Image: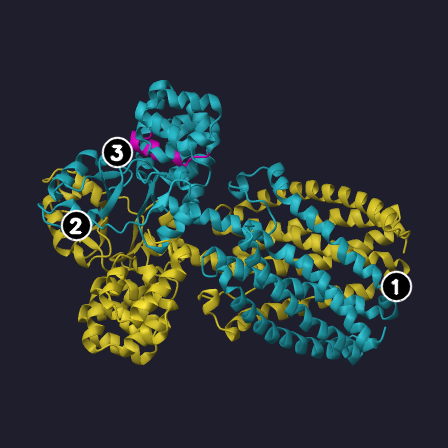
Chain colours: A cyan, B yellow
Amino acid sequence: MFDWENDREQLLDEIEEMISRKRYTQLRDRLVTMEAPDVALLMQELEEEKLPLVFRLLPKEQAAEVFVELDSDQQEMLIQGFSNTELKEVLDELYLDDTVDIVEEMPANVVKRILRHADPDVRKSINEILKYPEDSAGSIMTTEFVDLKASLTVEDALKRIRRTGPDKETINICYVTDDARHLLGYLSIRTLLLSEEDDIIGDIMDTNVIYANTLEDQETVAMNLNKYDFLALPVVDTENRLVGIVTVDDAMDVLQEEATEDIEKMAAMLPSDKPYLKTGVIETWKARTPWLLMLMLSATFTGMILNHFESSLAACAVLTSYIPMLSGTGGNSGTQASTAVIRALSLGEVRFTDLLRVVWKECRVAIFCGACLAAANFVKMMLVDRLLLRNPSVTPQVALVVCATLVGTVACAKLVGSSLPILAEKLHFDPAVMASPFITTIVDALSLLIYFRFATLILGI
Amino acid sequence: MFDWENDREQLLDEIEEMISRKRYTQLRDRLVTMEAPDVALLMQELEEEKLPLVFRLLPKEQAAEVFVELDSDQQEMLIQGFSNTELKEVLDELYLDDTVDIVEEMPANVVKRILRHADPDVRKSINEILKYPEDSAGSIMTTEFVDLKASLTVEDALKRIRRTGPDKETINICYVTDDARHLLGYLSIRTLLLSEEDDIIGDIMDTNVIYANTLEDQETVAMNLNKYDFLALPVVDTENRLVGIVTVDDAMDVLQEEATEDIEKMAAMLPSDKPYLKTGVIETWKARTPWLLMLMLSATFTGMILNHFESSLAACAVLTSYIPMLSGTGGNSGTQASTAVIRALSLGEVRFTDLLRVVWKECRVAIFCGACLAAANFVKMMLVDRLLLRNPSVTPQVALVVCATLVGTVACAKLVGSSLPILAEKLHFDPAVMASPFITTIVDALSLLIYFRFATLILGI
């Protein structure tokens, strides 16, 4: 097997050398043994002007597979250099959903050229899929699936699959429709193969079909594919007619993308759909600044609270040195709770009706965590800060204020952190946006208020 | 289609009523139209004593499918109540990898009973799979795959698949081995069906096989399945003999689990492999306290820095009120960078050799972000803090100190946030653990040092 991580540098050198010595047959023989995604990764490392040369060495089918895996910049560059015949050859080998993905990324003049050279059927399908909103089931489906009639025998069905199969994205699942293209049932190629030749499709198909609507969110579709362990999910239009299928490989990509998006939002970034190193500096800056700015300005409140208690701080200056620890611990506790709840929400493990259960659970966790932290902190303040660092102003009373605040802060943090995302989901906001930085800001303010309240109570300042 | 989210309450009521009125045939007819994961979800909401009754209504095959989807508590309860015949019936219907998953969760006495009633072949396979380390390819593979000999004709191969297929987890991909079970190649059922009946398997198979070793990390296996859009990946032992396959549905689960684990680690929690609401309070507490404790104690350093500069703060008290904003912004900037890099690392988009590219990119992003934030903050301090809130101690010089610190903090945060995870990966630590809370603590300390440095320079305190 080709081990990309280890052999990459060496392989790149080999290939560069074959190109410079014009050993094209040798290069071709090396490339055909590789899987398309690896060839694409390799081509991304080559100098741009060598790209068309290497691409033209590949056999037609592999060339199409590699083409799909390239960056859109490189795809565009190759298309610009293609003759009309070459373009048509590549297009003929592509699966429809891949063609649509490519078309979506290309500038208008390239799109026009692609559509002009696609088969009329394909052109019609491309145009239809392009109409669906981004991130909908319709936008990621393919229209190249196997459909069968309920009256066929297994033998006839297998014949039909043998005849039409080469152009379909998958033959593993076949769909049964009536004359008006309404979805009646489905069956796997396995059921077909394990049945008798004269069985009737209508008798052996499964009529409990899980399907999606064209406008449904792609994440829901992917989650369903995952939940039911399907290899494909049929997509129907508003009149319940079968218009396409979403295959498991695309569903997997969707789940990965959605996880990345959630992670980005939780870290206060606007989501980007490009890999990290492909995103430009300006783009990254644009994705990161809005939230930073908002959170920075919202920290005004904590500043105001501190100003308000300026005289208390002056009366007992040692209190200042524990503020970063308190706000850090509050932030971390809140982040833990919000992250756990946000992930559970997006995996469908928690819904709005579970709000009270979640809050009750977090309450108890908060008490345990808070007690632990307070105890550890009391010991640390007495032994390290007072004895070891010889700071006489760290009195047991001061330690008590800090520890009581810790318990209160952790409790607030867990409550705010766990309930805000659920409430956000109920109000149809994105729960991931309610994540750590946002909650941290709220918890910061709360923990300061608690701190000064305890300071007044216990130290009388 | 059954819409779980909306129909759940209603369906539950219906079913409770059918049970109380003993309308078992009606209940059975309702349940057989549902997919196994939905029946399992429903059963989880039922009272425990009704579980065996509902389970026994299900037809054998569906019963097994539902059984796999239940919680391990419920599985255990059902097994305890099964007669030996019932247990054997369920076990016979299960796929091997599912049986292994169940065995792993059961207490010793239940495991013994399962092994006693499993077929000798199955028992041997279970014991073998149980030997592989957790999270390895071996531990998630199934040994129920289709293997063919290279000398067979397509016709004979199809006959063999028809004969052995019912017991295999998938027939969509078939593997070709020699007499010593070495992996020679693979072919899809589609290739088989689209070939001539007298073609020889050895001629039409694909010999460039991507495979995994039994001890390989399950995440690598899942990533490869996703990268190459495979439906299954073969697993070989140290002597290169084919021992099992990992199917795409299991790979999808692995990717989801690993994403959850990364998210948990990034939020300073020890990862848990149970759903949020199924994890007990004590377990959650144990997963969350260690990092909270460590981060709390490490905040001692920030406290020490503040103590050290106590006199500076006393000389210009207004500086205190901007500390939360500075440390918040530093933390958020660092989190953004570290999260982006950690996710890119785990998707394989970034490797150690990219370190300089990453740092160079983050440097430029930091300058843009820092400049933006500083400008906005200067305006805000002058207009809001000085004019609107009438705080005369907010002088342009103080604003300059705060803004210069902002730029320095953002730069530090982005550099530390982006480089630490990559260095961690190089040293074979888990990069996700180097995430926000850890980096925040470092950035907190750095930002304070920068703050007081600028305060000394500009304000001369």
Say what amino acid the circle numbered 1 marks: Ser
Say what amino acid the circle numbered 2 marks: Ile
How many angstroms separate mark 1 from mark 2 (CA)? 85 Å
Q: Could you say whether the residue bearing mark 1 is in a helix, strand or loop?
A: helix
Q: Would you name the residue on which mark 1 appears? A: B311
Q: Is residue B92 visible?
A: yes
Q: Nearer the viewer, mark 1 or mark 2?
A: 2
- Residue A66: say if magenta: yes
Q: Would you name the residue on which mark 2 appears? A: A204
Q: Would you name the residue on which mark 3 appears? A: A167
Of residues A301 and B341, the one drawn nearer to the viewer in this rendering: A301
| Chain of the residue under label 2 | A
* Residue at 46%, 30% in the rendered image: A74
Q: Could you say whether the residue bearing mark 2 is in a helix, strand or loop?
A: helix
Q: Is residue B95 visible?
A: no
* Residue at 66%, 66% in the rendered image: A329
Say what amino acid the circle numbered 3 marks: Asp
How many angstroms separate mark 3 from mark 1 (CA)? 78 Å
